[in-house]
Amino acid sequence: MSLDSIPCDLFVDISGTDCAVPFSKLNDALDVLLPNQTLMAVSHKQALLSDIPAFCRQRNLQLIDKGEMDEMFYFLIKLQD
């Protein structure tokens, strides 16, 4: 299984970014999603394993899945109705 095999409506790579930049990129991506669509975000930063779930709770987003695959950390996020 690879990241390409996980279905999503939008993919965003937040690797190589620091501080607020990953969340700015996530917010920009979420602005184009429709309710019930999913966003796949990937990064090399392990710290985001705790930061992204907190971001989802604050934004009332559903974190469907998270994990590590292909040397990347991934987050599958669903935009709620």
Image (cartoon, rainbow, N blue to C red):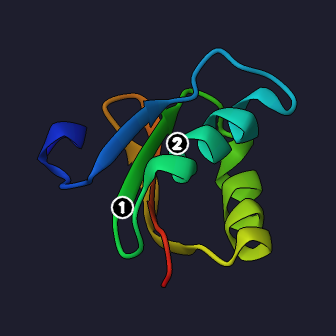
| Residue type at numbered disc 2 | Ala
> Quarter-wise, where is residue 60 in the image?
bottom right
Residue 30 % position (x, y): 54, 52
Q: Quadrant of residue 7?
A: bottom left
**Chain-order first, disc 2 or disc 1:** 2
* Front residue of 46 and 36: 36
Task: Identify the amino acid type marked 1.
Answer: Thr
Q: Which residue is mark 1?
A: 38
Return the mark for residue 66: none
Name of the residue lying farthest toward the bottom: 81
**Residue depth check, mark 2 versus mark 1: number of the one nearer the observer:** 2
In the depicted view, which residue is nearer to us: 47 or 56?
A: 56
Q: Residue at x 40, y 28 (%)?
A: 71
Real-space CA distance between mark 2 and mark 1, rounded to the nearest whole angstrom? 10 Å
User: Does residue 33 appear to the left or right of 53 in the view shown?
Assistant: left
State the image coordinates of residue 63 (x, y, percent, origin top left): 52, 71
Q: Position of residue 6 (x, y in %)?
A: 20, 53
